[in-house]
Amino acid sequence: MKIIKIIAIIILALFAIGLIAGKASGISLLSLNMHDEIYSEDGMALGGYDPVQLYANGEAILGNEDIQTDWKDLTWRFTTEENQSTFLANPEQYIPASGGHCAFAVGKGFAAPGNPNFAYQTKDGKVYLFSNKEVMEDAMNNIDQVVRDADINWDK
């Protein structure tokens, strides 16, 4: 009986350590709702990339620190004042699917940082981000399923 208690304590401790380490690296279980609504780095939405540029041209271009706005308690940067105005007219339109988290991870039940340099845009205009080149390449082998899984898990 004592051994079972020790094993249970060890398992719980490892789980807690895993949660803390995951949160520190930006990875969390979606089911625990520990993820951010929109992926950010130190309060900077999408790592400082211009969300309008991402949707309009599929390009990941860092925004200018002189052209930024605050929305949803995050700082958003833009490459031009026109992009800033476009965003402010309808911000929800320019948030990548899954809040900018990695679509592959979200499809598997985790929130992990997305990288605008690895973006995929669907025919209906949604933009999905992936954490790195390798993950995106793997996802492209079955992109329809990855997108479907990400949408289902994000909407839970």
Image (spheres, rainbow, N blue to C red):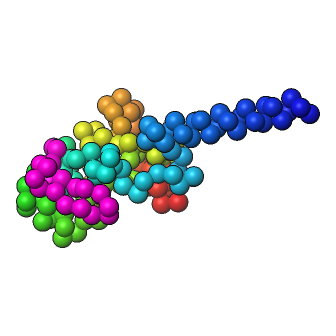
Residue pictured at 46% horizontal, 39% vertical = 24
Give the image location of residue 10, x and y in percent: 73, 32
On screen, residue 32 versus residue 42, left or right, reads: right
Above or below, 91 relative to 50? below
Q: Which segment did they paint magenta? A: 61-78
> In what quadrant of the picture does the N terminus appear?
top right
Q: Residue furthest left?
A: 81
Above or below, 13 relative to 107? above
Residue 44 drawn in magenta: no
Residue pictured at 14% horizontal, 49% vertical = 65
Residue 61's image quarter?
top left
Residue 113's image quarter?
top left
Residue 62's image quarter?
top left
Q: Nearer the viewer, residue 18 or 149?
A: 18
Classified by dominant secondary structure, the portion drawn in magenta counts as: strand
Q: Is residue 154 in view from this perspective?
A: yes
On screen, residue 36 versus residue 123, left or right, reads: right
Residue pictured at 14% horizontal, 53% vertical = 78
Residue 66 drawn in magenta: yes
